[in-house]
Amino acid sequence: MPTKIISPVNTEFRKKLDIRPGDTVRVWQKIEEEKGKTRLQAFEGLVLARKHGREAGATFTVRKVIDGIGVERIFPLYSPMIDEIEMVRRAKVRRAKLYFIREKASKEIKRQMRRIMEAKYEEETPAQTEASADDSSVNTDKNKTGAKPEKGPEQKPEVAETPKKE
């Protein structure tokens, strides 16, 4: 006599669910707040990896960037705490595991920070040239007193040319 399995998870639907790396999915997870109260929370992100195929211990990793910080979650495919898995977008990728996305994101952030620092430096540079123009007026006052003129970046040292021997 066959035994009837009672499960809150529709295992047949989850087996047929074709989640691949590169897909953007929205996972609706049940969150227990108080005794007996649950709410649904969505976690939308990029699927980095899927492990263990369609067996009972199958998992998939989803990555999401929140406020500039990468957050990864590993979801069991047949977890009763997952209410629904929505496919938002499908992408064609050429890798089975997309772990390189972690380094790619950090390199992009470093590149953005470098641009910001360069912009700040360029803003400070005009202020310094105005200050040097003010200093040049002070230098002329020193010249009246008989002090030696200071050489700035604009002034070139005088070099006497030697006659060429033919």
Image: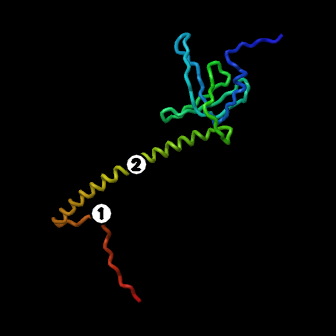
Q: What residue type is labelled 1?
A: Gly
> Residue shown at 32%/53% (left/top)?
126
**First of labels 1, 2 by sequence position:** 2
User: Which label sits on residue 29?
Assistant: none
Helix, strand or loop at disc 2? helix
- For this rendering, which residue is in front, 55 or 39? 39
Is residue 57 found left or right of 36 in the rendered image? Answer: right
Q: How far apart are marks 1 and 2 (CA)?
A: 25 Å
- On the image, the x and y values in percent for residue 15 come to 72, 25
- On the image, the x and y values in percent for residue 75 come to 63, 26
Is residue 9 found left or right of 142 in the rendered image? Answer: right
> Residue shown at 71%/20% (left/top)?
11
Residue bearing the label numbered 2: 119
> Residue shown at 67%/28% (left/top)?
59
Helix, strand or loop at disc 1? loop
> Which quarter of the picture shows residue 6?
top right
Residue 5 drawn above or below residue 18: above
From the viewer's perspective, is the residue at label 1 or at label 2 nearer?
2
Mark 1 Cα shell of 10 Å, populated few (<14), some (14-19), many (≥20)? few
- For this rendering, which residue is in front, 162 or 135? 135
- On the image, the x and y values in percent for residue 25 come to 61, 30
> Residue shown at 62%/22% (left/top)?
84
**Outermost residue toward the right?**
1
- On the image, the x and y values in percent for residue 166 come to 41, 89
User: Which label sits on residue 152?
Assistant: 1
Locate the N terminus by quadrant: top right
Q: Which amino acid does label 2 sit on?
A: Ala
**Outermost residue toward the left?**
145
Residue 150 drawn above or below residue 28: below
Is residue 41 found left or right of 93 in the rendered image? Answer: left
